[in-house]
Amino acid sequence: MSVLKLALLGKELSHSLSPELHHELFAILRKKIGAKFSKCSYERIELAEECDFAHWIKTAPTNGYIGANATYPYKSHAFNVSDKHIGVSAFIDSANCIRFINDEVLCTSTDGAGLVFSILRKHPAFDLGRYHLVLLGSGDVAKAAVYSLCTQWMPLSLTIVSRTIAHAESLAEFCIAQAPGPSVHLMSIEDFLQAPLEEKQRCILQCTPVGQINNPGNLLSGFAWHETDFAIDLIYNPAKTEFLQEASHGGAKVLNGAGMLIEQAALSQVFWMTGLLPDASPLSENEYESLEYHLSQLLTL
């Protein structure tokens, strides 16, 4: 029996609860999968530069690592250093999950599927086709999210709201090429806040780090929410960001990133242990609720 030795690679990782979550997940999934691993080791590893990331990937197998998660700002780098791109990562040129096997580096993206599974677990009747989708942010996680959402559903329209219009333009070109269908609009945050808001049924997806425990704030402060809106924030720490608090006060449905964290982590572990990517969540309702409760307890510490 061997150790499932893993790591989280990125910057400013002190707020991350991934190590604690992955240990709980391992106790569940190794039994279901019948994996050969006897225990799980999952570390936070902060890497200052791209060259540090590349060096870590190169030396990781000889240091006993089975795989790793990549987070900000290294998801596109995870894709670039990999020999094979599995599943969605091949379409979005980005990856959050790396697996080392037979002298090769394999990568995949579990973010988008994790988001879809988390939405449907809480809202089984959810249909993005009834909403105007608004992406707040234009980075790698926004790209993974919009690809998975728009290949499962077709929103009424897509608006990309970003602090950096050049990034928004790049994401818009990707969306038009990979998931054609809805009209695509680009806006700065200032323009979006000042625009006349006639449309209801908006699903607004907050994909930036603004609002995290170590980066407080709300890019849509003062936004006029409506009871037909659905606000989703991919942040899980804190459990209710300023963005979600304002949306809730305005009558919108809200969902934080805890479910996405759990679902993408479960998919990552299955990939590390088996090399496979399930088409559905590997977690039963009871297992998910147990992990959700454990995560909520960690957030209160």
Image (cartoon, helix red, strand yellow):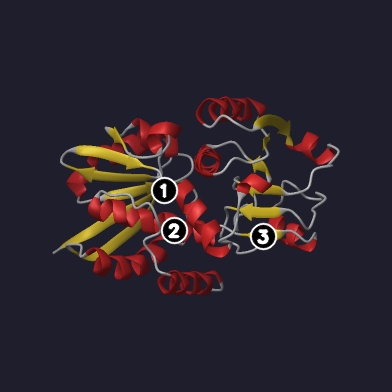
Q: In which quarter of the image is the N terminus?
A: bottom left
Instruction: Look at 80% across and 41% down and name the residue there.
Output: 193
Q: Name the residue under label 2.
A: 263
Q: Is residue 195 above or below residue 235?
A: above
Mark 2 neighbour class, 10 Å CA radius: few under 14, some 14 to 19, many 20 or more: many
Nearest the viewer among 228 and 244 is: 228
Q: Mark 3 points at which residue?
A: 254
Nearest the viewer among 241 and 133 is: 133
Amino acid type, residue under disc 3 in the picture: Val
| Of the image marks 3 and 1, the number of the one nearer the N terminus | 1
Amino acid type, residue under disc 1 in the picture: Thr
Q: Quadrant of residue 99?
A: top left
Instruction: Look at 80% across and 59% down and name the residue there.
Output: 250
Residue 66 falls left or right of residue 281: left
Q: In this view, does 132 lie above or below 227?
A: above
Residue 92 falls left or right of residue 28: right
Amino acid type, residue under disc 2 in the picture: Glu
The residue sitting at the left extreme is 1
Residue 203 falls left or right of residue 300: right
Q: Name the residue under label 1.
A: 110
Instruction: Answer yes or no: is residue 216 visible.
Output: no
Image location of residue 51, percent across then percent down = 36, 32
Q: How far apart are marks 3 and 1 (CA)?
A: 22 Å
Nearest the viewer among 49 and 239 is: 239
Q: How far apart are marks 2 and 3 (CA)?
A: 18 Å
